[in-house]
Image (tube, rainbow, N blue to C red):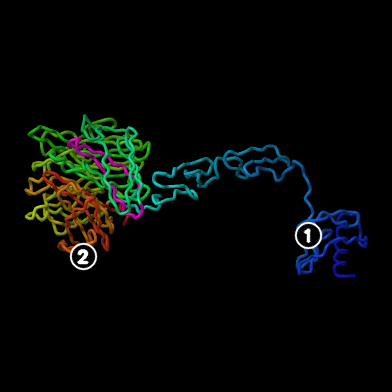
Amino acid sequence: MTRSTARIALVAASLAACEGTSSPGTPVTDTAASSTNDSDSTAGPGGSSSGEPTTVGDTEVEPTSDATDTAGSDVSTTLAPTDTGDGCAPDGISCDEDVAVTCEGGVIVDEEACEGVCVAGVGCLDCEPGSVSCDGDDVVTCGQDGSVASVESCDEVQGLECQTGQCIGSCAEGWLSGDHRGCDFYPTVTANIVSSEFHFAVSIVNPGTEPANIQIDGEDDLQITTVVGGGEARVVELPWVHELKEVGSGSRVVGGGAYRLRSDEPVIVYQHNPIEWSLDPEVAYSADASLLMPVNAWGDSYRVVARNSWYEKLTQAKLPGFYAVTAAEDGTTVTLHPSPTGSAVMPGPGVAASGEGEVMLDRGDVLVVFSALAQSNPSPNDLTGTGISADAPVQVIGGHVCTFVPHDVAACDHLEESIPPEYGLDTLHVVAAPAGADEEVATLHRMVRIVATAPGTTLAFTPPINEAPAVLEQPGEYVELGPISMDFVLASSAPVLVAQYMVGGGYDGAVGDPALVVVPGVNRNVETYEVHAPPDFPESYATIVAEKEASVTVDGLTVTDFSQIVGTNYRVARVLLGPNVDGHHQIASTTRVGVSVYGLATDSSYWYTAGYNPSQL
């Protein structure tokens, strides 16, 4: 007997024993084809490589794909499963794709087509518990109970799309740096006596290489689109929102009062109130500007800087300070905590005359609070130090409609600046004076306010400032220094808010007028800035604060004219910005530097912080 014949006989005997129809020794008809492979194998018991059935004794055996000879055994075999009809096992709920099948006692008792997903052992749910997935351009987060917990839309205007359960793109939150560059901003008109012939505007700077597609939305279905090329700047004029521009009868909420500016590439945005110094023959007289922080850098807790209400004796005008709170999420609750000097305000819906209040804002709504009107100068009514908290991130801009700084030095000018959230404050500040536009005035005088955020905050000044206190006892308490023209370094035991106020031109007899800037802490500074200085202003400057070892350039030219702050590692340069047609300037350093930008004109000025990173340590 050959080796192959012996194998077939063994297979036949095994099958006969299993079926009880044959016994060892039963004759076998061999129809199996031998393998064409190089290995020594057969097509299996009773099978052939052609797929035809093989007769083993009186039994016809169907061929199976598993019937192959393997090393370590002479043969393997698989028999076809038994047909059980509508039976099922085990008991419970199983899934047949998107159909939940319930089995009891081996019988299917229910079948349910799921609109969402089928989960074995549970059945139909809205979504897979704990999963995060994409539904078009929506990110869907599923709760542990299988219901949709949240839906976040990936904003097409910001160039975002949903992939692998997250928004992807240059403007995705996880891709942004957390500093003043971003893709979602809320320009907000603030109260100003300037003529409406002048224009509220935003300047948009694109620090990247790709063009940025911009969309600005406002009330009454206003929509403006433009493109800012890589490395370019563009000014967009926006209509005044008169409910915000005018003081009116009191504090109020202006529904949808803020503009929303979005980009599909990170950009830098400054707002100008107004953008022009003059429209021949008219002069604005009252102007300022603010850095706008993107929504991803907002916070939920702030301290205000503003200025005392002011009484103009000649015309008997009564002009207040203000703060404006803008929301980016519907249903945002804002709570007001007045400081000792901020406990007298113009009341309005949700805002008591004591300055206390709680107000609900939707996206784009603006809450504006005015200090109580003054009857004389200096007025005790001052919103500085007031605390603002919210259950969602908000933007806060502080300032004044128009005021003298100090209260008895001409002339009146508008003040405004966006305020850093408390999480972005610092304990180390370099406070540098602005340059004078006249040769005989190297640096202008200014007032400096320091606001505490924690009790018992100690202050140390280098060089020493004799009239400065050593401690601020309570959160919201502040000290004002000046007028002062010296540069100094401030170290505090807890984070503080520092603001500077350019004095009226009547103080130094120099060009310029009041303007407001917030000073970021040293640890919040960054290495590069791209800024916009409105070409309409006769002269614009950048004040640069740097460490000794830093190498700094402005528009590619190395800055060499630094002045050392005695007793410190810091130095200051005040650089006249060239007359670039588009007002775009680049400032770069080998280490972190602080930069503010300001313009000086007859009876007018603006001043803003060039940028910072509130989340950076």
Q: How many badges with numbers are in the image?
A: 2
- Mark carried by residue 200: none
- Image coords of residue 20 (percent x, y): 89, 54
Whether residue 194 sits left or right of residue 46 in the image: it is: left
For the stretch drawn in magenta, the main secondary structure is loop
Crowd around label 2: few <14 · some 14–19 · many ≥20 (10 Å): some
Residue at x 14% of width, y 44% of height: 604
Q: Is residue 70 above or below residue 139?
A: below
- Image coords of residue 445 (percent x, y): 11, 51
**Label whose residue precedes the other's in the sequence (2 or 1):** 1
Q: Of discs 2 and 1, which sits in the foreground?
A: 1
Under mark 2, the amino acid is Lys
Q: Are marks 2 and 1 in contact (CB under 8 Å)?
A: no
What span is in magenta?
Answer: 183-210
Q: Separation of disc 2 and disc 1 at Cα?
A: 83 Å
Which type of secondary structure does the marked residue at label 1 adopt? loop
Quadrant of the rendering where the C terminus is positioned:
bottom left
Under mark 1, the amino acid is Ala
Q: In the depicted view, which residue is nearer to us: 37 or 355? A: 37
Whether residue 157 sits left or right of residue 379 in the image: it is: right
Q: Quadrant of residue 4?
A: bottom right
Residue 202 visible, this orientation: yes
Q: Which residue is mark 2?
A: 548
Q: Is residue 435 above or below residue 415?
A: below
Asked whether residue 611 is drawn in magenta, I would say no
Residue 480 visible, this orientation: no
- Image coords of residue 241 (percent x, y): 26, 35
Quadrant of the rendering where the N terminus is positioned:
bottom right
Q: Quadrant of residue 395?
A: top left
Q: Which residue is mark 1?
A: 67
Q: In the depicted view, which residue is nearer to us: 404 or 304? A: 404
